[in-house]
Image (cartoon, rainbow, N blue to C red):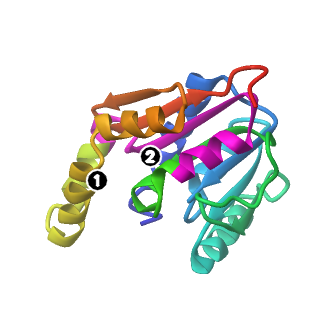
């Protein structure tokens, strides 16, 4: 999957940085798997990032990728779950997550945890996407014969339409935006200055 998705991470990193304006401070790649989004963000900013994933194999793979790309001074990888983050309140300037929200056991609890760890003024950029329509089409063409993968992707999409994510934000008391684009869906929100 690292090779299949290799080209989307730099594009998504640029989109995150452009949308949020966050280029320094502390960030988290939540459910980051191989850590490639964190690596791309580190290469394009002064952010210090934590890749957090519930699977030991993914954490190990992230550490290998961090070393391979020479960003050890900016990026670390650790075990953790979205629903119970082992980080103090108000410690993150940016939380990103590409693709993992579909696998969270309790999506609303995960969003509340993201809110908890964000500093006032901090941003969240969470969802799933391929960067651009063209990149999405390329990946879909490469996976055209993989009915299991395509079926699982369709099933996740049907269970998680934009209105579902908006309901989650409303239920969690978070003011945010659900962006539906050709290349994917993203939940974005900024913790207001002075918020708890």
Q: Is residue 14 above or below residue 87?
A: above
User: Do the numbered discs 1 and 2 sit on residues whose CB atoms are within 8 Å?
Assistant: yes
Q: Tell me if residue 64 can be seen.
A: yes
Q: Which residue is mark 2?
A: 8
Q: Identify the image quadrant of residue 17.
A: top right
Q: Residue at x 57, y 65 (%)?
A: 34
Please state the total of marks drawn on the protein image: 2
Q: Is residue 186 left or right of residue 125?
A: left
Q: Which residues are magenta?
A: 109-135
Which disc, if any, is residue 139?
A: 1
Residue closest to the eye, 62 or 27: 27
Residue 2: image x %, image y %?
47, 64
Task: Rate crowding at label 2 as few (under 14), some (14 to 19) or many (20 or more) other CA atoms within 10 Å.
Answer: some
Q: Is residue 187 left or right of residue 53?
A: left
Q: Quadrant of the C terminus?
A: top right
Q: Identify the image quadrant of residue 136.
A: top left
The answer for how far apart the CA atoms under marks 1 and 2 are is 10 Å
Q: Is residue 104 left or right of residue 45?
A: left
Q: Is residue 19 above or below residue 97?
A: above
Q: Identify the image quadrant of residue 154.
A: bottom left
- Specify which label sits upstream in the sequence, 1 or 2: 2
Whether residue 126 is in magenta: the answer is: yes
Q: Residue at x 68, y 49 (%)?
A: 28
């Amino acid at each position: 999957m690292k090779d299949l998705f290799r080209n989307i991470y730099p594009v998504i990193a640029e989109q995150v940085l452009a949308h949020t304006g966050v280029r320094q401070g502390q960030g988290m790649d939540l459910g980051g798997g191989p850590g490639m989004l964190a690596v791309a963000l580190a290469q394009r900013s002064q952010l210090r990032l934590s890749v957090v994933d519930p699977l030991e194999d993914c954490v190990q793979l992230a550490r290998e990728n961090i070393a391979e790309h020479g960003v050890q001074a900016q990026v670390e990888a650790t075990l953790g779950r979205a629903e119970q983050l082992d980080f103090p309140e108000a410690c993150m300037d940016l939380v990103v997550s590409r693709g993992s929200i579909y696998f969270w056991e309790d999506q609303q609890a995960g969003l509340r945890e993201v809110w908890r760890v964000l500093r006032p003024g901090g941003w969240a950029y969470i969802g799933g996407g391929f960067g651009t329509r063209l990149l999405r089409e390329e990946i879909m063409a490469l996976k055209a014969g993989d009915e299991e993968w395509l079926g699982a992707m369709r099933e996740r999409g049907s269970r998680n339409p934009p209105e579902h994510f908006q309901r989650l934000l409303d239920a969690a008391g978070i003011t945010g935006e659900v962006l539906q684009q050709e290349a994917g869906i993203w939940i974005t929100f900024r913790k207001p200055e002075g918020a708890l």
